[in-house]
Image (cartoon, grey):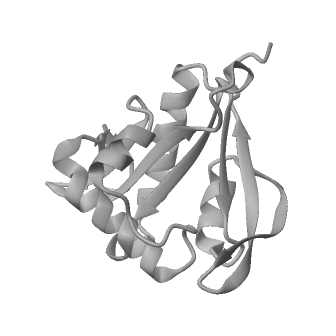
Amino acid sequence: MTAPGTGVRIAPMGPRHAGQVLAIYQLGIDEGNATFEPTAPTWEAFDTAKLPDHRLVALDGGRVLGWAAVVPVSDRCAYAGVVEHSVYVHPDARGRGVGLALLTALLASTDAAGIWTVQSGIFPENTASLALHQRAGFRVVGTRARIGRHRGAWRDVVLVERRSPVVNEV
């Protein structure tokens, strides 16, 4: 699927994208406002953690410009329709609509699968990500103050969520 206005193609993520996906993940980690993780995982750990039906890449030819994926928030059956997502865009591809294209496609995928809540935690300093999520229909639930230490300092995390408009809540 070609994302309107971006010139990029959104496609399922596979092992052939592993090197580029993990490199983009590491670039986000290195910038300091994307995650508490200190380093990108191995492909095997990444592949095991992410739900296989909800992993996407944004491609320009053979180059991965960004990726999006989800993990379940719990193995308890009550939370079967709740996932936490990540979306990362290569620094050189930012400001082109790649993040919104990925997030829009990811939400279409989760909606179709009956997932009723997609959530994420975002550092408040990551204003671009907060703006992206607002454009994609997420709402701020609240701020988890001093939730974890990162690079020697306490960090807050803004919890955002999006309820599916097509999945009926029981």
The N terminus, quarter of image: top left
The C terminus, quarter of image: top right
Q: Position of residue 140 (x, y in %)?
A: 80, 55
Q: Decide which of 121, 96 is in the foreground and name it.
A: 121
Residue at position x 83%, y 63% in the image: 143
Residue at position x 75%, y 56% in the image: 159
Give the number of callouts: 0
- Residue 119 falls left or right of residue 2: right
Residue at the top extreme, as displayed:
170
Q: Position of residue 64 (x, y in %)?
A: 25, 58
Q: Position of residue 114 (x, y in %)?
A: 60, 19
Does the rendering let one see residue 170? Answer: yes
Q: Taking 52 as reference, is 157 above or below it?
A: below
Toward which corner of the image does residue 20 lie, by quadrant?
Answer: bottom left
Q: Decide which of 110, 16 is in the foreground and name it.
A: 16
- Residue 170 falls left or right of residue 30: right
Residue at position x 64%, y 56% in the image: 133
